[in-house]
Amino acid sequence: MTSYVLAQISDSLSDSGGIAVYNPANGRLLANVHSHDREEISSIIDRADAARPAWQKLTAQERANILRRWHSSILRHLEDLADLITWESGKPLREAKGEVAYGAAYVEWFAEEGKRAYGEVIPGFSARSRILTLRQAVGTCAAITPWNFPLAMITRKVAPALAAGCAIVLKPAEATPLTALALEKLAHLAGVPANLFRVVPTAEAAEIGSLFCSHPLVRKLSFTGSTRVGKILMAQAAQQVTRLSLELGGNAPFIVFDDADLDAAVEGALQSKFRNAGQTCVCTNRLLVQDTIHDAFVERLVARVEQLRMGDGTNPEVDLGPLIDAREAERVAMLTQEAVSGGCVVRAGGTEAEGAFYPATVLTGVTSDMPLVRDEIFGPVAPIISFSDEAEAVRIANDTIYGLAAYFYSRDIGRIWRVLEALEYGMVAVNEGILSSETAPFGGVKQSGMGREGASHGLNEYLDIKYGLLGGIAA
Ligand code: ADP
């Protein structure tokens, strides 16, 4: 295991102890990473806050120049970074390369968007005065990220924070600290001041989450992860009324109406369900297929699923890598077995995990009350529910505590509008299986969280609005 970026982070690696990082494809130890404790992170936050005023004083253009150097450097090291992502997260190399390009795009986008943090001048409420607004950096921020996108979940938060003029301290997931450290190093080499942006791997996630919510200099916390942890952080954030962005769990429906282009729907379902072995918060969790086309759709989907090749993600032929660890694969197996005991039929794949691997699986005869479709599966299992009309599809789709992403396929323009408006989700893709982009606002409603990442909305998460009143104007 040699690479330029790995050599860059050698200081953060230790011979033993700390956080052990494993390759989920073969269970081998990749590296040991220093685990930061509460005291260390507390003083890193102090130093980040001290580095912030000089950064904030730069013009947006000057900050953009540095961010653009970081962007170029990420792309220059795309292959090395993709290797790291595949080694520590297991995702197929093709997807890892896609993630590097996608993650880098946030840096470029926010480098530019930082220049457009416009204020306003509003006519006053009396002849004497005028109202103005300034959009100013929130201050020093903290962030916590998951393992399913070891790179992109970081740039989505760090790029807008830095573009806005904030400092940021980020705790990556325990399973994937190597990519995070490499990204930090490339940022520093590109000119981001070393104390302004720090990555702090730790084995004490709960302790550090609580520190982020109680340290007096942390003004904002951005979290991507489970709804369970999001709720803990939200309760802790009450202590200091810390501003929050939460990107939490989802339960994405993928609805196929009888007027859909079936082949396009099958391809969309494949992308949306099996990308990253089903381990994204916007992955399809349940397919709702109209009864009149159910059998035709299932037949085509099964034929395509059977072509997916499972294996070590470093093999370029592989479509489906391992899950993040064997425990996760076992959890998915149990959910599937429970559904089969409840009467579902396995049409492709199976019900058994092999180490961290789980086969791409299609189940029919699923009902909307089964735990398999009420919980987030986070694995490569596609449960199919049959429905009879539009109203029923919308009712089943909305019958969840989550509201992140939804997908549907139809060619009827009236239905497209109706269903788009009726779905209680933060993001709805019509006739497309992938919707994430740095140019669009990513985020959820209900228990899927609050705040948006990407687009101009993503910058707003790191800006406060200040209202200024200028009086004494009338002569
Ligand atoms: P996932 O199911 O994606 O692992 P988690 O919510 O468990 O979702 O983890 C997402 C991130 O939250 C990881 O970086 C993890 O270390 C961190 N985390 C887990 N528990 C806590 C906690 N109690 N407080 C703060 N962060 C936590």
Image (cartoon, rainbow, N blue to C red):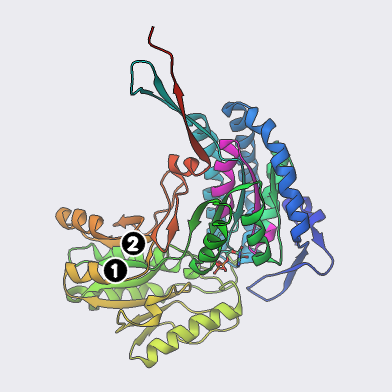
Whether residue 102 sits left or right of residue 72 in the image: it is left
Boundaries of the magenta span: 152-178
- Spatial separation of the CA atoms under disc 2 and disc 1: 8 Å
Instruction: State the residue position of label 1.
Output: 397
**Quarter of the rendering occupied by the N terminus:** bottom right
- Sequence-earlier tag: 2 or 1: 1
Residue 208 picture location, percent across and down: 67, 61
Task: Work out whether residue 24 can be spotted.
Answer: yes
**With respect to residue 162, does 289 lie above or below?**
below
- Check if mark 2's residue and mark 1's residue have beta carbons within 8 Å: yes
- Indicate the amino acid at tag 2: Ala
Image quadrant in which you'd find residue 187: top right
Mark 1: amino acid: Ala
Image quarter for residue 6?
bottom right
Ligand 1 is found in the corner quadrant, namely: bottom right
Q: Nearer the viewer, residue 76 or 161?
A: 161
Q: Above or below — where is 144 with respect to 394?
A: above
The residue to which callout 2 is attached is: 406
Camera-side residue of 201 and 319: 201
In this view of the protein, which residue sits in the foreground, 331 or 260?
331
Q: Please give left or right for residue 30 compared with residue 395 in the image.
A: right
